[in-house]
Image (spheres, grey):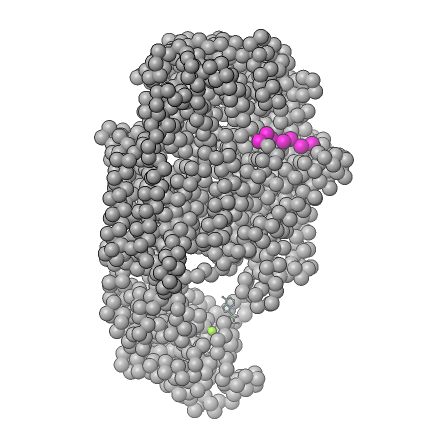
Amino acid sequence: MGFYFAQFLTGLANASSLFLIASGLSIIFGVTRIVNFAHGSLYMLGAYFAYTLITTLDAGGFGFWTGVILAALIVAVIGAVIEILVLRRIYRAPELFQLVATFGVLLIIQDVTLAIWGAEDLLGPRAPGLSRAVRIFGEPIPEYDIALIIIGPVVLGLIWLLFSRTRWGVLVRAATQDREMVGALGVNQRWLFTSAFMVGAFLAGLGGALQVPRESVSLLMDLSIIGEAFVVVVIGGMGSVTGAFVAAVIISVLNAFGVLVFPQISLVLPFLVMAVVLIVRPYGLFGTAASAHGPPTVPEAPMKPMSIAGIAVVAAAVALVALLPRLDDGFILVLMIDVLIAMLFAASLHFLMGVGGMVSFGHAAYFGLGAYAAALAVKALGLPMLAAMAFGPLVAALGAMIFGWFCVRLSGVYLAMLTLAAAQILWGVTFQWQSVTGGDDGILGVWPARWASSKPAFFYLALVLSVAGLVLIRHLAHSPFGYVLRGGRDSPIRTEAIGIDLRAHQWLGFILAGAFAGLAGVLFAFSKGSVFPDALSIGQSIDGLIMVLLGGVQALIGPIFGASAFVLLEDYISRLDYWRAILGGVILVIVLAAPNGIAGGLSGLWQLVRGGRKTGERA
Amino acid sequence: MLTRRELQMALAAAIIAAPFAGGAAHAQDPIKIGEMNSYTRMAAFTEPYRKGWELALEEINANGGINGRPLEIISRDDTGDPAAAIRIAEELVNRDEVVMLFGGFLSNIGLALADFANQNQIFYLASEPLTDAIVWSNGNKYTYRLRPSNWMQTGMLAAEAAKLDATKWATIAPNYAYGTDAVAAFKEQLKALKPDVEFVEEQWPTLFKIDAGSTVRALEQSKPDAIFNVTFGGDLAKFVREGSIRGLFDDRPVVSLLSGEPEYLDPLGDEAPEGWIVTGYPGLAVNTPEHDAFETAYVDKWGEAPKTGSVVGYNSMMTIKTLLEQTPSLETDDLLATMSGLEVDSPTGPFFYRPADHQATMGAYVGKTGMVDGKPGMVDWVYADGADFLPSEEDAAKMRPAE
Amino acid sequence: MSVLSVSNLSKSFGGVDAVRDVSFALGAAEFLALIGPNGAGKTTCFNMLNGYIRPDRGSVTLEGVELVGRKPRAVWRMGVGRTFQITQTFPSMTVRENVQMALISHHRRTLNMTRRATRLYAEEADTLLARVGMAEEAARPCAELAYGDLKRLELAIALAHRPKVLLMDEPTAGMAPSERIALMALTGEIIKSEGVSVLFTEHDMDVVFTHAHRILVLNRGTLIAEGTGPEIRANPMVQEVYLGGGTVFKGEANDA
Ligand SMILES: Nc1ncnc2c1ncn2[C@@H]1O[C@H](COP(=O)(O)OP(=O)(O)O)[C@@H](O)[C@H]1O
Ligand SMILES: [Mg+2]
């Protein structure tokens, strides 16, 4: 009995930590509709600043708590700077922009933190006066855990007071429920958004600072918390602080007891719970339909078929690329194979997001499924390469069929989060199921068949399959089916009102996008000779998002530019020190300066050159 | 308009390709060697390693290089992603035309590179990855491994653990291949030495996301006589904190893999546990003439004490130096033939590369954690020769796939 | 004979009755107006008629077939078209493509992946656009259209399926008076030529009295009057609702 109660308390202490960071994320989302990927970085900064302050102030309990609060305040100011310099400019952009922009911020903060505090973990002191354990029912409970258990609800109470007793709070709640209304109230929206972001950043910083007595401060804190923080916000209902609290308690307590029964559970538990909650309650426990969407976005221009001259140029470009093996210096082809694979992956994601309006934060799931299916087909089933290449997309499509059935029932951010959960669950399975997938040691020896094993041969294979995939995707986008998807993106209500079963079409679109991603994954597996869980990690999904964004969301040709630019850029800058910060900087520049991506930028440039021809034509 | 845009794409492709054309190597050039490691992803662990090989490289080139030719290391960040590592390896091998590859910290990258080496018929010296698979179940002709492996280091610990008066054991390890392999290897070797041991509890926290409180309580509940730990980094710090505050380590021996390495121990500061049985590296406390020379040079150059990675990095370069001095040519086949049984002198003593399984016999230090001059370190340590903790060469050869 | 029969339709939102026991019938080729102040429940009625909202009670039959419980897309297939108070079109398509979409659905070609969508039913779409006087705008991006044009486009979209019943929620809101007259005149012609029955809501009483064959008056969710223009004008309850509420019969356009 005492044991289980103590385990429960441990869960609650963790819940408090999780709640602090999630509540800030939720407030930021509620007011600004931004999915703030850099929230984990703010949390990490809170911990680093607190470490520095606490170890320098070094004046017992007073110094500790002052350090904690000061650290949170510093982070709040940093939050304000980020909001003013970056986010303020992209509130009207699609969800994808904000996610990718905040990811850019995350990259920059990672390297800045490394430069300032160094690579080694920093272990701060325990909290003065709270460094021992007390016995409850005979079980030792750390005093600091009890402090955390109290701090969580206290902060919840303070937020509640702030929301219900101040004009600012009323405005924040109004903004969370109805964006347009705030504009109508004549409120200075800028100030409201900045201050909401600051409060969110403060809470993240506070969460990080309060971790100092529990864990060592490290450069991995940002990414290790952000996934769970998202989960908590989504389970609670985006924008709901109470929801965040309840969800944090559920996740933490489940985990505390889960490890007793099934010690490996932590890997997927949060994402499993999120998937179940979203399937049962599509807007989370306390969320409302209104909170699912960002601001309405500028509609893209109608699609144009490719002109004869255009087709000729594309054919010429493909022919030119096909000549590359003659120029090969041993590496161009390798790089070009990566580019081709990335193009196909990005185009499949773009088909889902750009054409279908279904933003996926977990598209790597299908890339990875294709890669693993092909690898297993070769290694376990002993299939020849071509059969494995057909098997991969099929399995990816099957996976997309299963997950897509749930995902298309949601929309906006919740859809994105369910795709993320799906990808994370799959990642957990490949990671854990060592007997089949080899766990994180992966599957090795997935090299192409002999006839395709020379670099030029495999390059041509990749070229043919990628170009075929790209042409097919483009063709689909122009077909009635593609138009239905675009219609569903533009106006689901109208689509249903002209007799179309939108969900069924979206489901099929999801499956097709999955199959194309799977084909990219298959090529990937054979080009690298091995498959690891990284192929379906969040990182791979984000890479896809960055490519789509770099290329331009509103142009079918965008992914081709975006993927080329991303692969070449990444390959080049990883040679430099602090390449993450550089990549982050490039992402921010693109997001802020060329929100239509490379394709949009080029066509804009072209129109300037042509002297202000009518705008709005797109491929 | 579309036509033009596509034209621009073609132009872009041409521009992209341009800088990559040309540039073949000449015979008088330095000997080029490719190196990569997870310099950003695992900065705390790979920095000392880099400093180690950079020091050795400087010494080699200051002494006239290899037979008059300087050594050039092309060093890259693998970004912690196996796919990126493969791409970089392709570039190093095919464009830069390096004679061999070395490096790697993460096991999955080590395995991917080993497989790549096999496919592309290039010699790869796996410096840091610990996984046994790289020389055994996935071993291949082209891959050798330097660092004492999972099996060897758990064997060293099992030998110590067998001496304890403990039969009921609990284990805690991060939930990924390194953790599961280490626990399995420890169990197998301890059971062989002491058949009556019993493993009563296993905890598998997610790597770098340990819920230490719950995990500690789950271990405590099983009331083990002793604990075998594999967690490291931030997980270890949290585990130590939560464990000591809850009395998990009171009167309970802990055997802990790698925790004596300065990379793992230093960040714990004055909260470093005392009396844990660990493998690791005592750093400045090692007082052999070879080590003193290395130590002095290292401290002079970098202004800090060497860590485990420093030794691994340095010994990697010592291996390469010895190899290149002895090999008849830089052809891969000659390099491989020379590697087989190659004897290398190093700051931590001589070791050789076993012909049967390509594993180096470099050892590790086994001792207890304690305070040394007010800083956490190793006490009562001995150097355990790797050769003593490896299966016989015949047995090892049976574990490797047929070539 | 009535095409659409509504009986005892009721819906409440959180205890507030938005629509209560509404019953009426829409005759063949009838032009029927549903009027009432803001918040009277007109849009809610429409939403129940075409399946967006499931009524708490009541029934809606189209030529004797029950509609309640069917999805909007099924109701549309059975022949009930709709335009929206807040227009619902596809802004990233051209005007013609908007109509083509409805035609593609009408011809059940939505799963086609081989043809080029813009080549399907282009002439048919142009005919429909000409019908609503938008032939000139066919190639323009829908996003560029003025509000009044969007309403006419919605009408063309609705006609694509050759509906038996057309529900038009505030079709003239946001239009200049002359445009209003023109659109309603056009609708009147369509009723005559295609034999479609139209139920519409409208705030401009001039429009209502000029064009509607019959008028229903809704107030706080209840039907309070039903009759021809002169009958309604003379109805004291209607006067009470409109005049007593401080509003004139005009000037309530553009509500939300
Ligand atoms: N989804 C809804 N949830 C709650 N109340 C609603 C909803 N839709 C409409 N209402 C309420 O029902 C009443 C009728 O609204 P509506 O049908 O839009 O009126 P009208 O179209 O006549 O202006 C109003 O009081 C409105 O606030
Ligand atoms: Mg209305």
Measuring from the top left, give residue C11's x and y in whole percent.
Answer: 48, 69
Query: With A535 as the anchor, is A184 left or right in this view?
Result: right
| Residue B382 lies in quadrant | top right
| Residue C46 lies in quadrant | bottom left
Measuring from the top left, give residue A343's x and y in whole percent.
Answer: 34, 44
The answer to which of B280 and A153 lies nearer the viewer is: B280
- Which residue appears at 35% of the width and 83% of the height? C185
Measuring from the top left, give residue A527's x and y in whole percent.
Answer: 32, 33
Query: With B267 as the anchor, is B53 left or right in this view?
Result: left
- Which residue appears at 46% of the width and 50% of the height? A590
- Which residue appears at 45% of the width and 29% of the height? B76
The answer to which of B69 and A270 lies nearer the viewer is: B69
Q: Is residue A123 magenta?
A: yes
Q: Quadrant of the N terminus of chain C?
A: bottom left
The answer to which of A523 and C140 lies nearer the viewer is: C140
Q: How many marks?
A: 0
Measuring from the top left, give residue A347's x and y in whole percent.
Answer: 35, 48
Q: Is residue B320 magenta?
A: no
Q: Is residue A163 visible?
A: yes
- Which residue appears at 45% of the width and 34% of the height? A575
Specify start and end residues of the magenta stretch as a single range. A119-125
Q: Is residue B187 visible?
A: no
| Image: A260 above or below B145 | below
Overall secondary structure of the magenta stretch? loop
